[in-house]
């Protein structure tokens, strides 16, 4: 990121959130981002996810210039380059774990049979082969988060962006989820960028960042 700015406006009021952020991160790292509530962590993550746009500045992720990309290029970026993991999982409640992972692949153009094959592989990777026919209702929070990690890795992205992925989980389950993220980095060569409120997790990355007053601090 180079000189990235983001300000929200409500009527006459302006709320500067990201203030001239410049940041370069090597690939294949586990990166954590901490910061007070409302400091703009999700905003930063959403900009990297191409869900939101910055007001100014340059953003390049694995060769994708988000700041200058067309809508079509951004769609491609979301489908190919990144995988997203949310705090509240965002799974389809009436679909099985397998279909939750396979459907987005299929919608992005992969044939049904290959989508199922890749979904099976991803669910095995997160240790949920035995739960693949279960729906989210029938799974624990940790299992649901593992399904959403399977969904995020199924298309072999270069980068996983995760917004408080353990925010809704107990500490033991959180540790298991963190182990999975480390596996993504070490064994799958995926970079992971995750926002956390947890002090311990916030210290456990290869790179640990803090967002404060619109600025990034490296510690
Ligand atoms: P964090 O994830 O660090 O808690 P956010 O990035 O969600 O913080 O939000 C940062 C600030 O920007 C908050 O004060 C929030 O109210 C504000 N904000 C976020 N999204 C919007 C929006 N779409 N419109 C206006 N204000 C927003
Ligand atoms: Mg947030």
Image (cartoon, rainbow, N blue to C red):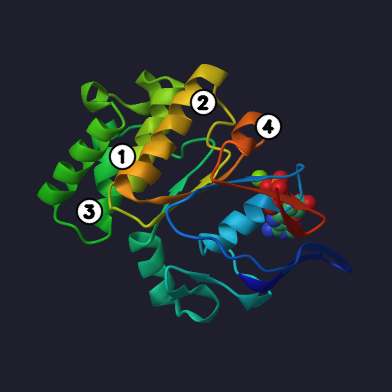
Tell me if mark 1 has few (under 14), some (14-19) or many (20+) residues whose alpha carbon lies within 10 angstroms of its own: many
Marks 2 and 1, how far apart at CA: 21 Å
Q: Is residue 179 left or right of residue 153?
A: right
Q: From the viewer's perspective, is the residue at label 4 or at label 1 nearer?
A: 4
Report x, y in % for residue 99: 25, 39
Q: From the viewer's perspective, is the residue at label 2 or at label 1 nearer?
A: 2
Tell me if mark 3 has few (under 14), some (14-19) or many (20+) residues whose alpha carbon lies within 10 angstroms of its own: some
Callout 2: helix, strand or loop? Answer: helix
Tell me if mark 2 has few (under 14), some (14-19) or many (20+) residues whose alpha carbon lies within 10 angstroms of its own: some
Q: Earlier in the sequence, mark 2 or mark 3?
A: 3
Callout 1: helix, strand or loop? Answer: helix
Report x, y in % for residue 76: 35, 69
Q: Earlier in the sequence, mark 2 or mark 1?
A: 1
Dot 1 corresponds to which residue? 100
Q: From the viewer's perspective, is the residue at label 2 or at label 3 nearer?
A: 2
Dot 2 corresponds to which residue? 174
Residue 92 visible to an observer of this rendering: no
Residue 199, which numbered label? 4
- In the foreground, 100 or 217: 217
Q: Is residue 28 left or right of residue 86?
A: left
Residue at 53% x, 36% y is 165
Dot 3 corresponds to which residue? 106
Marks 2 and 3, how far apart at CA: 30 Å
């Amino acid at each position: 990121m180079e000189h990235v700015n983001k300000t929200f406006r409500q009527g006459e009021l302006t709320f500067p959130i990201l203030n001239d952020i410049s940041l370069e991160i090597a690939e294949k790292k586990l990166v954590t981002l901490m910061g007070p509530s409302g400091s703009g962590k999700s905003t930063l993550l959403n900009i990297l996810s191409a869900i939101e746009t910055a007001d100014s500045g340059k953003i390049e992720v694995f060769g994708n210039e988000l700041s200058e990309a067309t809508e079509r290029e951004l769609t491609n970026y979301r489908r190919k380059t990144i995988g997203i993991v949310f705090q509240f999982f965002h799974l389809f409640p009436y679909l099985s774990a397998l279909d939750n992972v396979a459907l987005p692949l299929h919608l992005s153009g992969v044939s049904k049979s290959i989508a199922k094959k890749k979904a099976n592989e991803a669910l095995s990777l997160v240790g949920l082969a035995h739960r693949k026919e279960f729906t989210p209702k029938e799974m624990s929070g940790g299992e649901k988060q593992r399904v959403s990690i399977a969904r995020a890795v199924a298309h072999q992205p270069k980068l996983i962006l995760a917004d408080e992925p353990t925010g809704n989980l107990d500490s033991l389950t959180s540790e298991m989820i963190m182990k999975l993220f480390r596996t993504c980095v070490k064994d799958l060569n995926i970079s992971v960028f995750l926002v956390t409120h947890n002090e311990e997790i916030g210290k456990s990355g290869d790179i640990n960042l803090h967002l404060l007053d619109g600025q990034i601090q490296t510690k």
